[in-house]
Every structure is written in structure tokens, then in C-alpha cells.
Image (cartoon, rainbow, N blue to C red):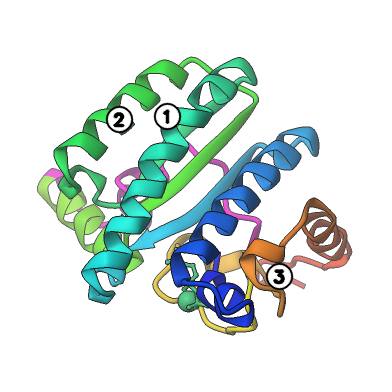
């Protein structure tokens, strides 16, 4: 989800207004993803590199995150959405950790859609943690690493979308994207609508996936 800051700048608004609009887009897209029958959706909300941002912006983002969980948890619970958090989220502030713990527990039995939120997530950090855990148990094999990734239990990554015209992965799901289809759109995240998600899915459906075969 990229482009909140530029969305705000275009409107001469503070960056936090872009992040608020970004939360609205999350709400709309999560609902649409459920309606479209997506099994899982992972949203990159805060990276392990976002700590480089000004303290005020970080606190705005954490505040929005907390408010989002508080306001939308009932809807997730009611709509059979299972929440998952990937990344080193236990290192976040204790009040955020407590909120997440409660949200995970409340939605643990849900089955329709898994909504994974990447918080304090970096793929290299995830891989170091997974490899370390695998090594502690024996040989470091691809299967052993996979078993210790934060995404364990989720379906394979099929489609990875990045908004705002940037054409890079920025440390997101590096292992999981080995055979994912990549989709880049110039649209800024707050402008990304269910119809845009549908357009990405339509293009995905037309791609031919060979996984290294013929
Ligand atoms: C949102 O967009 C991504 C988050 C870290 C929440 P940005 O804040 O990166 O927006 P731009 O790139 O400055 O436009
Ligand atoms: Mg950005």
C-alpha cells in the first residue's frame, strides 16, 4: 500500500490525512476481497524500515492502526475474517501488542478470508528468524524454512500488487514471491478501489504460470 503521502500532498494536506484516506481504502478493499472470494489478503502496513520516518508520523500510523482494530474488529468477527499479523509485531508498544493479541484470539476460529497485516515486517528479518529456527531443529531445507515463515499456514502467494508507480518489492514477502505474479499500478493507495482490485485479478487470470516448466 504505497502513495498515501503523495495523495495528501496533491491535495495540500498533511501526510496523516493521506494515511487516514489509506485506512478507508483498506476497509473498502478488505470488504471487497471477502465478496470476491479471496482466500487470503496480506497488507503491508508498516515495514521494519519505516522506523526511519519522523517520530510524529510513526505515532500517527500506530494511532490509526489501533483505531482501525478497535473500530473494525466486530465486523471482521461477524464476517468470518481471520486476522493474522506477520512481522516482528511483538516488539511494538505494549498497548498495540495487547490489542493485536485480543484481535487474533477473537478471530482465530474464522474461516472465510484470512487478512494478514504486515506490521514491523521485513522479509529479510523474517528469513533470518525462519532460518535460525530451522537450524535449531536440524537441516536448513526449503521446507524447514517455509515451516518457520510468518506466513505459515497461508496459501501460496499468487498475486502481489504494488500501488503508486514504484516498481520494487521493498523487502516484502521475498521468499513467498518466488513465483508470484507481480502487478504494478500508478494509482496511489487511497485511490485504489475494488474495481482496481478486480482489474488486477482479471489480468492475473490471463497470465500463464509455468513455474519453470514449459
Ligand atoms: C503509505 O504510503 C505506506 C505506509 C508506510 C503506511 P507512504 O506513506 O509511503 O506514501 P508516499 O510514498 O510518501 O506517497
Ligand atoms: Mg511510500
Q: Between 206 and 63, which is closer to the camera in this rendering? A: 63
Q: CA distance from mark 2 to mark 3?
A: 45 Å
At mark 1, the secondary structure is helix
Residue 130, percent across and down?
25, 53
**Percent position of residue 60, x then y:** 34, 57
Which numbered tag is attached to residue 99? Answer: 2
The dot on residue 213 is 3
| Region of the chain picked out in magenta, as a range | 137-162
Q: Residue 157 is drawn in which quadrant? A: bottom right
Residue 27, horizontal then vertical, whole percent:
62, 42
Q: Secondary structure at mark 3?
A: loop
Q: Residue at x 51, y 63 (%)?
A: 17
Cβ–Cβ below 8 Å for labels 2 and 1? yes
Q: Is residue 172 visible?
A: yes
Taking 143 as reference, is 194 left or right?
right
- Camera-side mark, 2 or 1: 1
Q: Is residue 188 left or right of residue 135?
A: right
Q: Earlier in the sequence, mark 3 or mark 1?
A: 1
Q: Is residue 94 magenta?
A: no
Crowding near pointer 2: few (<14 within 10 Å), some, many (20+)?
some
Amino acid at each position: 500500500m504505497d502513495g498515501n503521502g503523495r495523495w495528501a500532498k496533491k491535495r495540500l494536506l498533511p501526510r496523516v490525512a493521506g494515511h487516514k484516506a489509506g485506512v478507508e481504502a483498506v476497509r473498502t478493499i478488505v470488504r471487497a476481497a471477502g465478496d470476491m472470494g479471496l482466500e487470503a489478503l496480506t497488507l503491508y502496513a508498516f515495514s521494519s524500515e519505516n522506523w526511519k520516518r519522523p517520530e510524529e508520523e510513526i505515532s500517527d500510523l500506530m494511532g490509526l492502526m489501533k483505531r482501525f482494530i478497535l473500530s473494525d474488529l466486530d465486523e471482521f468477527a461477524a464476517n468470518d475474517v481471520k486476522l493474522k499479523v506477520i512481522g516482528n509485531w511483538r516488539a511494538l508498544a505494549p498497548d498495540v501488542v495487547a490489542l493485536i493479541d485480543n484481535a487474533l484470539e477473537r478471530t482465530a476460529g474464522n474461516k472465510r478470508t484470512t487478512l494478514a497485516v504486515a506490521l514491523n515486517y521485513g522479509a529479510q528479518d523474517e528469513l533470518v528468524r525462519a532460518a535460525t529456527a530451522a537450524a535449531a531443529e536440524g537441516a536448513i531445507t526449503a521446507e524447514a524454512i517455509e515451516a518457520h515463515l510468518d506466513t505459515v499456514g497461508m496459501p501460496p502467494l499468487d498475486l502481489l500488487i504494488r500501488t503508486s508507480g514504484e516498481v520494487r518489492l521493498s523487502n516484502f514477502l521475498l521468499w513467498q514471491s518466488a513465483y508470484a505474479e507481480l502487478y504494478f499500478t500508478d494509482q496511489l493507495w487511497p485511490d485504489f478501489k475494488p474495481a482496481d482490485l478486480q482489474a488486477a485479478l482479471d489480468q492475473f487470470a490471463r497470465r500463464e504460470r509455468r513455474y519453470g516448466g514449459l
